[in-house]
């Protein structure tokens, strides 16, 4: 026999009848209550999917399905068009319409990034209205005018497309050329620059531009006819790796070339300016040459400054030694006097300048070696 214990037996509430107080007695359901509960149950019931008949058996759905329905999947962006502008209120709407027409034919996976570089007209207001009509248009506004390089750098940072296209906002660059640029990128190039072979600009701009492009191509070793063309296409990894500041935007192909990227060029159509006037004068060419020196030094000689200063120092020193050696030989022979020969002082100056150049190169080498900064290399692919 089982032993009896004094411990209380656990209650089984599943067989307990509900207890009602005197104020909560069960009463008969009315028709209105039944209808209201049926309506509430119908509202809380899951809505059948499109094409599914109510009342039919369907596969069980996951709990996260209703939440995903409210969060539409974002389509991947293939092409990002970066457009810096300054006081172009008359042309931006027409440009946006032309870009939309062109990019829709390419699949419609695009975004337009307008960078208002401190415009003083109504350019930002027009861009804001365009954004409300087309959410693929994004607008970045600077507080003041920073320059085209700063605008492009900010646009590159915000761009999400696989291919990035840059162009000006003055309608001189034809959006219909974008498919040709993208086609060249897909053929294997990393950067494709436009060549305005037939320019619709006055001669005061075309002749200096040709001279500038010739000198730049000779010094950089890149066979491009038009470094100043704003219509260019890049792969995404190119714009994420180059550092553009100051006025270096026209040298992006050179910066990319020295990192190992492939550079291409195609002839593009150039249109006459329709609205307003150009924002660039003759001063940009002088600044361009100074920026070219900056690019050459910071890319080729930043890690080996003695190769730059040392070469010119040795040339100057050698020239000075040759001049003074010749004069000293004549002085020993008694054919001349060093006191009345200014060329002797020129030789001494060349020797001093040459020694200073070599010294500057050595100081640069010591600074470079003392920094111990890990170098960044452009890596094309990693297999793991």
Image (cartoon, helix red, strand yellow):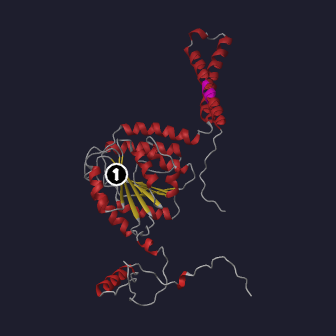
Q: Is residue 315 above or below residue 285?
A: above
Helix, strand or loop status at disc 1: loop
**Magenta region:** 356-360
Question: Is residue 358 located in the magenta-colored stretch of the structure?
Answer: yes
Query: Which residue is depicted at the point 63% across and 60% down?
Result: 382
Kindly identify which residue carries mark 1.
199
Residue lying furthest bottom: 56
In the figure, is residue 184 to the left or right of 177? Answer: right
Question: Is residue 186 located in the magenta-colored stretch of the structure?
Answer: no
240 and 299: which is toward the camera: 240
Q: Quadrant of the C terminus?
A: bottom right
Q: Is residue 115 above or below residue 338?
A: below
Q: Position of residue 32 (x, y in %)?
A: 29, 85
Displayed quadrant of residue 23: bottom left
Q: Is residue 65 above or below residue 142?
A: below
In the figure, is residue 315 to the left or right of 48? Answer: right
Q: Main secondary structure of the magenta part?
A: helix
């Amino acid at each position: 026999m089982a032993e009896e214990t004094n411990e209380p037996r656990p209650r089984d509430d599943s067989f307990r009848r509900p207890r009602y107080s005197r104020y909560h007695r069960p009463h008969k359901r009315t028709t209105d209550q039944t209808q209201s509960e049926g309506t509430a149950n119908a509202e809380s019931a899951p809505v059948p999917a499109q094409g599914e008949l109510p009342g039919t058996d369907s596969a069980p759905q996951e709990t996260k399905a209703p939440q995903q329905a409210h969060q539409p999947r974002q389509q991947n962006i293939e092409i990002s068009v970066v457009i810096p502008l300054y006081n172009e209120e008359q042309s931006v709407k027409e440009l946006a319409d032309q870009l939309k027409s062109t990019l829709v034919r390419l699949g419609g996976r695009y975004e337009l990034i307008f960078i208002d570089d401190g415009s003083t007209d109504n350019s930002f207001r027009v861009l804001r209205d365009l954004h409300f009509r087309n959410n693929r248009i994004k607008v970045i506004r600077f507080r003041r005018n920073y320059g085209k390089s700063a605008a492009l750098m900010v646009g590159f940072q915000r761009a999400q497309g696989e291919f990035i296209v840059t162009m000006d906002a003055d309608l001189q660059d034809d959006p219909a050329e974008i498919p040709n640029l993208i086609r060249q990128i897909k053929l294997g190039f990393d950067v494709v620059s436009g060549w305005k072979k037939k320019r619709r600009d006055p001669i005061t701009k075309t002749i200096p531009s040709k001279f500038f492009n010739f000198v730049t191509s000779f010094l950089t070793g890149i066979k491009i006819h038009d470094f100043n063309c704003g219509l260019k296409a890049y792969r995404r990894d190119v714009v994420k790796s180059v550092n553009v500041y100051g006025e270096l935007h026209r040298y992006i192909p050179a910066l990319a070339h020295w990192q190992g990227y492939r550079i291409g060029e195609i002839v593009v159509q150039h249109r006459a300016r329709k609205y307003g006037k150009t924002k660039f004068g003759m001063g940009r060419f002088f600044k361009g040459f100074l920026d070219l020196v900056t690019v050459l030094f910071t890319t080729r000689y930043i890690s080996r400054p003695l190769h730059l200063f040392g070469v010119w120092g040795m040339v100057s020193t050698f020239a000075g030694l040759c001049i003074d050696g010749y004069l000293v030989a004549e002085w020993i022979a008694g054919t001349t006097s060093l006191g009345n020969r200014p060329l002797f002082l020129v030789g001494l100056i060349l020797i001093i300048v040459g020694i200073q150049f070599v010294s500057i190169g050595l100081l640069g080498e010591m600074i470079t070696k003392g920094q111990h900064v890990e170098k960044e290399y452009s890596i094309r692919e990693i297999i793991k």
